[in-house]
Image (cartoon, rainbow, N blue to C red):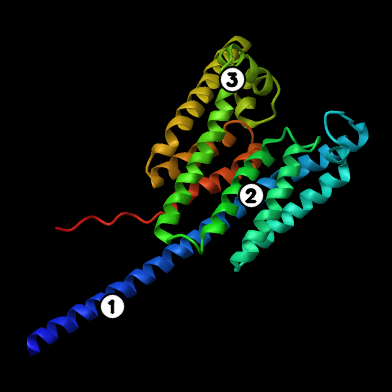
Amino acid sequence: MQQNTSSESNLSDKKLQSDHDELIAEEEIKQRIILAHRIVQLGVILSLVWKWSFFIQANDVYNYFQLQDPFFPEMMRSAELLRITYLLVVGTCLLNLFSSSNSLRIACGLILFCGLTILCTHQASYNDMTFVTAWWANLWSLWLSTRINQDNAKTLIRKAALLSRLIISVILLGGAAGKWTSEYWSGSVLYDIYFIDRDYWVFNFLRDSFETESLQTIAMWYSRQVIVVETVAGFLLWTLPARWAAWIGMMIMTCIALSSNFLLFSVVSCLIALASVGLMVPRVAPRTR
């Protein structure tokens, strides 16, 4: 009788210890989720401020020419709205980065969603991919904020990583879809954009080292590898394990900027941060027999 009581006590202690360990593990994963949210918000901030000097020049040009495209409503042609929205988005993103309240995260996410939507549809900024990628990254952050206190942490971090690489895949496929043309496949488009007079160390080196005919051939293969990498990564990235997808996604985005133009970090910084979410997924412990 005493032995049975002792066995039951041991089982009860083990169960309590197991429950305690599970609670600790759940809390650790939740902290990873919050860290992932902050990293993505930091990526959005970097994207928005990376081209600050370019935005200042664009603002001056916009004021000088006073463009009035009737396609856009009058409000969406306002330079004041553009400036206020941009500053509001950057300030809200900074607040969101340091917020410890999930309610405040959600509120910031909603403000950012509205602000970035305006920047994506304003006459002066609709064609800038910086705001498009920032919009997608913030949409992910807003979704995550609404689920932190609702879903199991282990399940949520895996969903978050999957959603992050799905978004990156969609963006890569969108870029690839526009390049599957004879002009891009021949390299003529990127030759005109980058190889003729782009002041960047890669293209400066190539112009100093090769003749025009060789440059056109290099441009053709450069363009083709861009198309193939974006297409293959777009179709396959989301199917990879979380950590593999994270490293590959971060590498692709970094190489895109390094091989083309440092200003492209304004487009890919938030995507690099988004790709890094896969690194937050806990490793699967090996099964013991």
Residue under label 2: 44
Work out how far the residue at label 3 is from the one at label 1, CA to CA, in angstroms. Answer: 70 Å
Q: Nearer the viewer, mark 1 or mark 2?
A: 1
Q: Nearer the viewer, mark 3 or mark 1?
A: 1
Residue 2 or residue 136, whichever sits in front? 2
3 or 2: tag closer to the N-terminus: 2
Residue neighbourhood size for the residue with mark 2, other residues' Cα within 10 Å, grouped as few (<14), some (14–19), many (≥20): many
Assign the C terminus to one quadrant of the image.
bottom left
The residue beneath circle 1 is: 16
- Residue 152 position in % (x across, y down): 42, 61
* SS assignment at label 3: helix
Task: Name which of mark 3 and mark 1 comes first in the sequence.
Answer: 1
Task: Report if residue 132 is visible in the image.
Answer: yes
Closer to us: 44 or 76: 76
Query: In which quarter of the view is residue 79 placed?
Result: top right
Question: Would you name the residue on which mark 3 appears?
Answer: 209
Q: What residue type is disc 1 on?
A: Leu
Q: At numbered mark 1, what does the secondary structure look like: helix, strand or loop?
A: helix
Instruction: Name the residue type under label 2.
Output: Val
Instruction: Tell me, yes or no, whether the two marked residues, 3 and 1, touch with CB atoms within 8 Å.
Output: no
Q: Answer with the quarter of the image where residue 211 lies.
A: top right
Above or below 98: residue 229: above
Alpha carbon distance from label 1 to label 2:
42 Å
- Residue 37, x across and y down, in percent: 55, 57
Vertical arrangement, residue 212 with respect to residue 68, above or below = above
